[in-house]
Image (cartoon, helix red, strand yellow):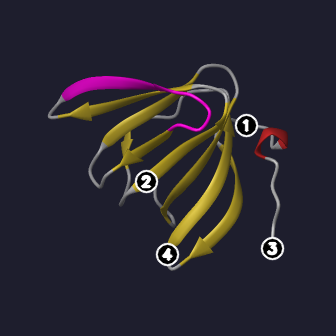
Amino acid sequence: MKIISSRAFTGSRAWEALDIANFEGTSVRLHWTDRPYQWHINDGQEVFAVMHGCVEMFYRVAGEEKSALLNVGDIFYASEGTEHVAHPRGEARILVIEKAGSV
């Protein structure tokens, strides 16, 4: 059993992660960041939930770049093959559920 205060988690570098669970090839990690990630496509599906802060998620649909502003409680679902990049606005803590070992 674990009880985790996401707001209290801080990293020493952008996108530092706290491993919460790993089951049947799926990882659940809490990330802390204050910097954008990089454009990428995961090896499978990804669920991205903002726990603290605000994140602008950029993604491409049929080659067209779009974005959505995600606030606390908002969830971004990237289906397999969705190219995307997260840009936090200040500090953010994000719960990410994805295939273990994914980018």
Which type of secondary structure does the marked residue at label 3 adopt?
loop
Residue in view at x 17 percent, y 30 percent = 63
Along the viewing direction, whichever of 31 and 38 lies nearer the viewer? 31
Question: Of marks 2 and 4, which one's residue comes earlier in the chain?
Answer: 4
Question: Of marks 2 and 3, which one's residue comes earlier in the chain?
Answer: 3
Question: Of marks 3 and 4, which one's residue comes earlier in the chain?
Answer: 3
Up/down of 17 relative to 89, above or below = below
What is the crowding at mark 2: few (fewer than 14 residues within 10 Å), some, or many (at least 20)? many
Disc 2 from disc 3: Cα separation = 24 Å
Disc 1 from disc 3: Cα separation = 27 Å
Q: Which residue is mark 2?
A: 46
Mark 1 and mark 2 in contact? Answer it, CB < 8 Å: no
Please name the amino acid that badge 3 sits on: Met
Frontmost of labels 2 and 3 is 3
Frontmost of labels 1 and 4 is 4
Q: Which residue is mark 3?
A: 1
Extent of the magenta region: 64-74
Please name the amino acid that badge 2 sits on: Glu
Q: Is residue 76 left or right of residue 2?
A: left
Frontmost of labels 1 and 3 is 3
What is the crowding at mark 3: few (fewer than 14 residues within 10 Å), some, or many (at least 20)? few
Residue in view at x 66 percent, y 45 percent = 31
Please name the amino acid that badge 4 sits on: Gly
What is the crowding at mark 1: few (fewer than 14 residues within 10 Å), some, or many (at least 20)? few
Residue in view at x 38 percent, y 53 percent = 42
Q: Which residue is mark 1?
A: 13
Disc 2 from disc 4: Cα separation = 13 Å
Disc 3 from disc 4: Cα separation = 19 Å
